[in-house]
Image (cartoon, coloured by chain):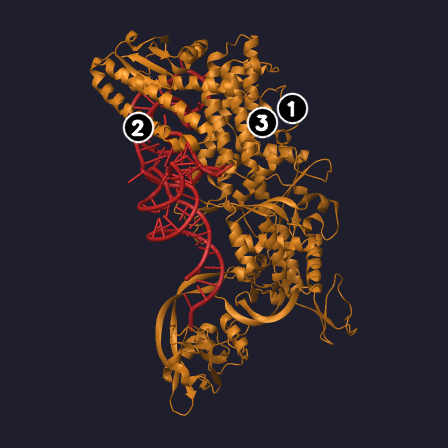
Chain colours: A orange, B red
Amino acid sequence: MDFPSAYNPEKNEKKWWDFWIAEDFFSSTPNPDKKSFTALLPPPNVTDRLHMGHGLVVTTQDILTRWKRMSGFNCCWLPGTDHAGIATQMMVEKSLQQEGKTRQELGREAFFQLCCEWKDKNGDIIIEQLKKLGASCDWKRQAYTMSEGLSTAVRRIFVSLYEDGLVYRGERLVNWDPALQTAVSDDEVYNEEINGNMYHIAYRVRGAEADTQVVVATTRPETMFGDAAIAVHPEDERYQTLIGKEAQIPCTDRWIPIIADTYVKPEFGTGCLKITPAHDFNDFEVGQRHHLPRINILNPDATLNETCPELVRGQDRFKARETLVRALKDSHQLIKIVSIRHSVPFSDRGKCLIEPRLSLQWYVKMQPLAGPAIEAAATGDLKFHPDTWQKTYFHWLENIQDWCISRQLWWGHQIPIWYCQGCQAINTGMEDPTSCSTCGSTDLQQDPDVLDTWFSSWLWPLSPFGWPEKTKDLAYYFPTDMLVTGADIIFLWVARMTMVSLYTMQKVPFKDVCFNSIICDKDGRKFSKTLGNGIDPLEVIKSYGADAVRFTMIQLAPLGGRVKLSMEDFEHGNRFINKIWNAARFLHGKLGAQTLVPVDFEALPLPYQWLVHELHVAATRMDQQLSSYQMQESALTLYQLMWHAFCDWGVEITKESIEGKGTVEDQQIASAVYFVFEGILRLASPFIPFLAEELWTLIPVHPQWKREKSLVISAFPTAASTPAFPEAAHTWNRLQEVISGVRSLKSQMQVEKKKDLALFIRCEAEFRSVLESQLPLVKKLSGVADLQFVASLQEAGACLANVGPGWSLYVPLADLTQIPKEKTRIAGEMQRISKIVMGLEKKLQNEAFVQNAPADVLVQAKAQFANMGSQLESLRESLDSFG
RNA sequence: AGGACUAUAGCUCAGUUGGUUAGAGCGCUACGUUGACAUCGUAGAGGUCUCCAGUUCGAAUCUGGAUAGUCCUACCA
């Protein structure tokens, strides 16, 4: 068979992906005889395009899912997309804008239709990109938050919560995005520090004395038209006389009371605070305490409304500020302007300055839902990896605020609430009402708002499996097993899924939540569009292949960490792919002609027993590491096994010991080597599925591995399915030390080219017999012509020495002028070792240590003491031999 | 302001219940290519595990404190 000299990722990735999909390996249906493993793909927005964050989440989850699939689980990894209310609406509006149209001109229905069309055209781009990475999702189940089924679930949960009194409508301050003209939730707001001004403004006070003033400091002077009071601290001596008096809002003839409230910090600003309940969150509360009126001064587009004086009416908030400041200057009521740096809220979506604005919105009462969610994490039903996130989770839930779920958008699930135009009653239900349930009137009007996108995504563990129907899917797959996601949506998504699952099903939605790393550039800055410092995964896949990208990411990124990623990092994964490919190519050339037979492992030569044992150790370790979500470590285990055990030693040994005459011994060795290699491919499959599959089909069939139709559904090696040879492995390790010792000695002498070099070795009798049994191989691997056993150093003469545990290697010094240099080296070595020996001696003489240390630690220390002691002895002997 | 996390080799990071001569990859040095792979091999150099105190027979690992950095939450009228 022809074996290509280089691996072609692009060609093979397509080939194998098509094969896997055609054979339907990733689909799952409920099967009571098989244990399920369910994972949820965090549904990307339909507006998303693949970035490294997705890449990492998908790779991590795919590795775990593929590993579980190969371990015999019935795996369902559920994919899908989120309709992304605001983001999609913005996209569509933008394209409308280019045609010079607005959504208002188009009308709600047509606009909604346009959004649907946009989704149909662009919504699956991200999904196709995920597939490029090899995501082994159950693609037949691909869900979408606006699909019919999922929309029913949204309606069901809304109605249930409403009926349970957990959904209510209230007039509150919301974060108002004037650009999008909608409320956004607290979690969609971010703060940014900007340069601003603090305006000190004088209000006239009505009282006995003429011209008394009270000076307040504010960053938003225009909000004064919504002022309902001026507050001072009740114990602030400066202002005692003012409490109870009235002050006049400049530019108006409105008078407001001066009140006392402990919220005011006397040391801040002037110690006098204007209270604007309708436009500031804290003032809202102060206002509530003092029963102050809430005066809304803003139109939805943040222009000042009719409650304001003509001076500013109709002007934009920033324009109005300028106008007002000029007017205040003229009336000498502007005391001063101080420039400050302060953080102000911005809308995550609209990127514009948020205005707190009074409006009627729908809310979910969160406290009753939070309790069980706290409980679940406290009892360990729900675990976080790393678990430090638990604290954050608790803190948020314990201080939870009600969730504003209405959005003034057109794209999304319209709120299933109908207001009776007759009696004002509120109607809801699973069916659209035709008449008012209170008065029977047919004049009903549906609430124009839509629900927050998260109000559908929080049902992700439930709705795609058919909830609220009691489906077989739901019974089999729910609760799911695992979620991998970014810690940034622990509140927005993770906690809410937990709450709604506990509310509806009395069960946590998943047992384990893994938070993946945040990906940064070389300078530690987060990847962001505005900085343009991101790395496009698709571009990297193009140049290195999906496997290289996957492997690089997973071995670089710990759970819950922060990883600095640069383009060059992907060369690491690429080299690994190349290395494996070439190892396979070598096996093909050297052993390819062999027919594989069952291996009699017990009868294998020592080094091959070691190699088999290495597979056993790695398989055991990887299973354990993956079970505890240590993907990074398991990738390293795989890497070490493949590169340093199999290639550096296994392949080298094979080169020396196969004779190529078709003997039984050769056949056994070839079969053993391929047994290990196939084992490694199996271990590698979850990490680098494309390459593994390609090589797996190229290698000869091994009778001791069960051959399935594809590697992706083959058994993952375990401790039980791989033979172990701990003693043989230990023995071979000792021989490896000698081989390295010889190489080191040669390197010191710079005699790489002297193939006829002969060395002396002195060692214990027992080890000598082992060494003799493997002497030809040891000589070949260490690259010397001869290795002679000597009983003493005297036999060897003036020598360079290399001392290890239980053996000393000597090579005669050709050049006697090197003796001083060698003496210095040995002295240094002796110093290093005697330090260790002295430490051990002190330890062993310490009775407290002897008494308290566990038995195995003690035994180890004693053995090491003896070992190092004898090495020291040998070194001293060498030093002495130089006179 | 409150909270969380991080501090280990020049760089990027491992180090799972306290017991190793503290590791890996990249980079660096020396040597090595007549077919697995130079996308390579062999051998090296390089670390008072940020600092101070404590617990312990024993601390990179646990506790307290300091310093520096990152992030989150709330917020400054």
Q: Nearer the viewer, residue A842 or A319?
A: A842
Amino acid type at circle 1 is Lys
Measured as percent of width and height from the top left, residue A89 is found at: 59, 59
Q: Is residue A205 above or below residue A409?
A: below
Q: Disc 3 or disc 1, which is closer to the eye? A: 3
Measured as percent of width and height from the top left, residue A133 is found at: 55, 39
| Quadrant of the drawing holding the N terminus of chain A | top right
Q: Earlier in the sequence, mark 3 or mark 2?
A: 3
Tag of residue A706: 1
Drawn side of residue A503 relative to residue A298, left or right:
right
- Could you tell me how far apart the alpha carbons at marks 3 and 1 are, in whole angstroms? 16 Å
Tag of residue A719: 3
- Could you tell me how far apart the alpha carbons at marks 1 and 2 are, in whole angstroms? 53 Å
- Could you tell me how far apart the alpha carbons at marks 3 and 2 are, in whole angstroms? 40 Å
- Image mark 1: chain: A
Q: Earlier in the sequence, mark 3 or mark 1?
A: 1
- Image mark 3: chain: A
Amino acid type at circle 2 is Lys
